[in-house]
Structures are given as C-alpha cells and as structure tokens.
Image: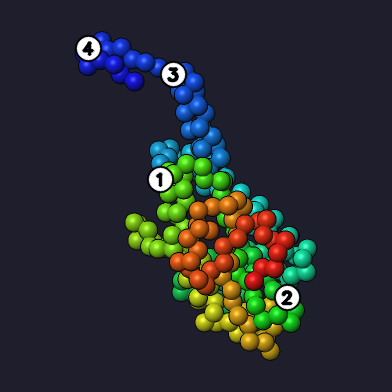
Amino acid sequence: MRLENCDNPRYVVSPGLLGMGIAYTVARYYQAETEVSECNSKSMRRWINDETNRRGHAFARRVFETIRAQGYEARLEETITALLNEKLEKDWGDVDVLAWKTGDKDVLAIECKDLKVAKTPNEMAEQLNRFSGQVSRSGKPDDLLKHVERCNFLRERAQRVAQTIGMARQDIHIRTVVYFSNPVPMQYVAKRFPDVRFLTIDDLSEKLV
C-alpha cells in the first residue's frame, strides 16, 4: 500500500499476504486453472492445454469405470462420427462417456468436467462464464452449450446411435448429463436447463436418471 504521493514514497508491505498471493498465482498456473488467454508464452499455453487434457481424460475414465461397475454398458470418449458411422461436415467432438443398460431406453450422453471447488466470487464467476449455456464473447458456444448442441444432434439421429450400441430395435432416448468432480455453482442454476442433469462424482452411487 502506497502511503504518499511523492518521488520517494513510503509503502506498507504485508509479507504474509504477498506470499499467499504469489503461492496462489503459481498454483493456478501449475494446476491449469488459469485461462489460456491469460498466458503470454507458448510454453505456458501448451502446459495449460496439456494439463487440462490430462486431467480431463483421467476424470472421464474415472466416471467411465464407476458407471461400468454399476452394471452399465459404456463407451469412453467416443467421437460423434464413430457413433453415427458417417462422415459429418462439422466436427462435433466426442462424448466423454456414453452409458446405457440392456432393456432400458435411456442412453446417457455424459460430459465430464474436473473442476476445483470455487471458493471466491471471482472463481464462481469464471466457472459460470465457461458453463452458462450461451455463446461466448468470441462468438463460439461455451463448454455447456457445446454439449447441449451435441446431444440435440444425437437425438436427431438416435436410431443411428441405437444401431451402433446394439439397440437397433429400441426407441432410445438420449439424455444430457454433466458430471463435475466437485460441487460447482452451475448446479444451483440448473433450473435454467430442465433437460440437462448436473451431478457430481459422489452422485454416481445414486440412480443416474
């Protein structure tokens, strides 16, 4: 804190707060919790992307294995092209986990997000901005809207999905599900998305739909 407005001002410095601030900043970069747009170097941007992908794949596999242990058939990180067995003009990405049970018409298209617990208003706002189900300032759909649009696209071609997973004779229903690693603010605005079920990894002990 600057005390004076002169050529040689005095300052009050809190070593404790300064240390906490530095540790917090370094931890955010190390744990890939900083947006790529905030990184100046190519090396840091590459680290953020690589670490985010590594954690994302690890969490998706955790959800996949837990669901399989509950008696579900499941596919891990299946591309939309593979599910529909056709070439598409648009890259729709993949479904982190696709799960179903024999004899049940519900097929769960699950998006898995490994996010830390948001503790401050700023952290909550960051997560809500990334998962608001809207088009971002860059003109692209945010992470939640991407999954919603992907599921809507699969519903239009539900019979192709049914054929791929061995349920060709059933009228399946594609359900949109998002699993988070921890409680997140998006769960408290879920009423805005009545067709999307927001859950945490702890909810896997319950019936999924």
Q: Is residue 142 left or right of residue 54?
A: left
Q: Is residue 66 left or right of residue 19?
A: right
* Mark 2 or 4, nearer chain start: 4
Q: Is residue 122 left or right of residue 30?
A: left
What residue is at 54 percent from the left and 34 percent from the top? 27
* Mark 2 or 3, nearer chain start: 3
What residue is at 72 percent from the left and 61 percent from the top? 205
Residue receiving disc 1: 37
Q: CA distance from mark 3 to mark 1?
A: 30 Å
Q: CA distance from mark 2 to mark 3?
A: 58 Å
Residue receiving disc 2: 101
* Mark 3 or 1, nearer chain start: 3
Q: CA distance from mark 2 to mark 4?
A: 73 Å
Q: Alpha-carbon neighbours of circle 2 within 10 Å: few (<14), some, or many (≥20)?
A: some
Q: Alpha-carbon neighbours of circle 3 within 10 Å: few (<14), some, or many (≥20)?
A: few
Q: Alpha-carbon neighbours of circle 4 within 10 Å: few (<14), some, or many (≥20)?
A: few
Residue receiving disc 4: 7
Q: Alpha-carbon neighbours of circle 1 within 10 Å: few (<14), some, or many (≥20)?
A: few
Q: Nearer the viewer, mark 3 or mark 1?
A: 3
Question: What type is the residue that disc 4 sits on?
Answer: Asp
